[in-house]
């Protein structure tokens, strides 16, 4: 079965491509490499002992996309390709709407033209916004997005619902990721942020390896266990396997049409201070930090209700916090300059 993976050279995409190959799917990656390197796929091929078809292209380029659907008999599309920096999305919102929303519409149009109906979308816990109580459940209404990035995820989910309403062949799954961290246990593929990392774990890892001086902890006066924010961190390999589970779910539900949403998380909230402590233990390094003011847009605490994914996808995030830290550290140590090293 051939799966088209847009954005498959990126962080979550590359780990998912590996899981797909390990589960005997054939993979075609379509990526414009705006935030990734082809080296990730070279390493995935080595780990899997299998080859990947790679096409460099933009999801907004319908002509090129269409050629891919002509060349390969694609059974399903897993759609990772997007810009993902929350702060940047506030500065250049039009680029985010163009890339993430218009790009997704282009992809759906080309899929429709080629009668490919199975679609798995990378959504985010950010769609729940601040109005909903934790833990977040799939039946909750969307909250108000806190950034253009978050809004782009809500919009694409809406596009999928409207498209499904008009087209009874469409079979969409929207996976709402919580906070993916970690790396493949081999230490050869992982997260490779360009410039100063926005997210907590890559920043902590770069402090541990000596690339950054100290971590700023954004706020210690939240109404949480220790005053710092709590998030639902899950291992990227568990997340990757969630995509295989979603694909299997589509295969098993041949009569399904419409859109189904699933939360992918562990169901536990972990504080920033707890992450720092766990990373120190795993790496045997001290992480110098200072407490700085709250970051605009951060919510105090959120985590997933994972019952639906556990029961229906038969999926669970099994890897421990310690494993997430150990694997992040191994990747960082072995690749201090990411895929450049
Ligand atoms: P990433 O930046 O590592 O991967 C995204 C990939 O998409 C990159 O390889 C990039 O080159 C490619 N891409 C971007 N725009 C493209 C375009 N127009 N055409 C073709 N390729 C394009 O990001 P990631 O962390 O792997 O995230 C993957 C998906 O998961 C994204 O949709 C992101 O919004 C979503 N997501 C990520 C997180 C997270 O914390 N990492 C959480 C929730 C949801
Ligand atoms: C985690 C916690 C920070 C950096 C973002 C997006 C979300 C999703 C995942 C895509 C927060 C704190 C962080 C630092 C810190 N992405 N922190 N110092 O904000 O939960 O989610 O990535 O969909 O949409 O918003 O993740 O890793 O940035 O932050 O104290 O240098 O770590 O305040 O509490 P976040 P994060």
Image (spheres, rainbow, N blue to C red):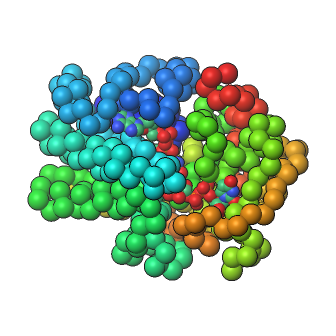
Judge left or right: residue 127 versus residue 182.
left
Q: Is residue 3 above or below residue 153?
A: above
Residue 208 screen position, x and y as percent: 80, 42
* Quarter of the picture holding the C terminus: top right
Ligand 2 visible in quadrant: bottom right
Residue 94 screen position, x and y as percent: 34, 50
What residue do we see at 77% from left, 41% from top? 212
**Nearest to the observer: residue 256 or residue 222:** 222
Residue 91 screen position, x and y as percent: 45, 52
What residue do we see at 19% from left, 52% from top? 170
What residue do we see at 12% from left, 38% from top? 113
Judge left or right: residue 268 versus residue 279.
left
| Residue 142 in sight | yes
* Quarter of the picture holding the N terminus: top left
Judge left or right: residue 280 versus residue 24.
right
Residue 263 screen position, x and y as percent: 46, 62
Q: Is residue 104 above or below residue 25?
A: below
Snapshot quadrant of residue 28? top left
| Residue 48 in sight | no
Q: Is residue 4 above or below residue 174?
A: above
């Amino acid at each position: 079965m051939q799966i088209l993976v847009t954005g498959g050279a990126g962080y979550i995409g590359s780990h998912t491509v590996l899981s797909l190959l390990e589960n005997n799917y054939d993979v075609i990656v379509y990526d414009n490499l705006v935030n990734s390197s082809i080296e990730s796929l070279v390493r995935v091929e080595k780990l899997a002992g299998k080859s990947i078809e790679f096409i460099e292209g933009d999801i907004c380029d319908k002509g090129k996309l269409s050629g891919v659907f002509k060349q390969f008999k694609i059974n399903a599309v897993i759609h990772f390709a997007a810009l993902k920096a929350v702060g940047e999305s506030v500065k250049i919102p039009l680029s985010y709407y163009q890339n993430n929303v218009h790009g997704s519409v282009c992809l759906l149009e080309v899929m429709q033209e080629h009668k490919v109906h199975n679609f798995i979308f990378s959504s985010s816990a950010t769609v729940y916004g601040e109005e909903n109580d934790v833990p977040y459940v799939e039946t909750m209404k969307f909250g108000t997005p806190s950034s253009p990035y978050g809004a782009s995820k809500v919009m694409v989910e809406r596009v999928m619902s409207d498209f499904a309403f008009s087209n009874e062949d469409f079979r969409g799954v929207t996976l709402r990721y919580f906070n993916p961290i970690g790396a493949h246990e081999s230490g050869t593929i992982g997260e490779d942020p360009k410039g100063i990392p926005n997210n907590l774990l890559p920043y902590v890892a770069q402090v541990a390896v000596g690339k950054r001086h100290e971590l700023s902890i954004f706020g210690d006066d939240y109404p949480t266990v220790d005053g710092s924010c709590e998030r639902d961190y899950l291992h990227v390999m568990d997340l990757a396997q969630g995509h295989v589970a979603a694909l299997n779910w589509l295969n098993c539900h041949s009569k399904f049409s419409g859109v189904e949403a699933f939360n992918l998380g562990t169901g536990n909230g972990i504080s920033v201070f707890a992450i720092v402590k766990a990373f120190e233990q795993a790496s045997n390094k001290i992480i110098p930090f200072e407490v700085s003011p709250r970051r605009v847009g951060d919510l105090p605490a959120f985590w997933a209700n994972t019952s639906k994914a556990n029961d229906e996808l038969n999926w669970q995030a099994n890897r421990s916090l310690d494993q997430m830290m150990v694997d992040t550290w191994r990747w960082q140590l072995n690749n201090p300059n990411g895929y450049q090293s």
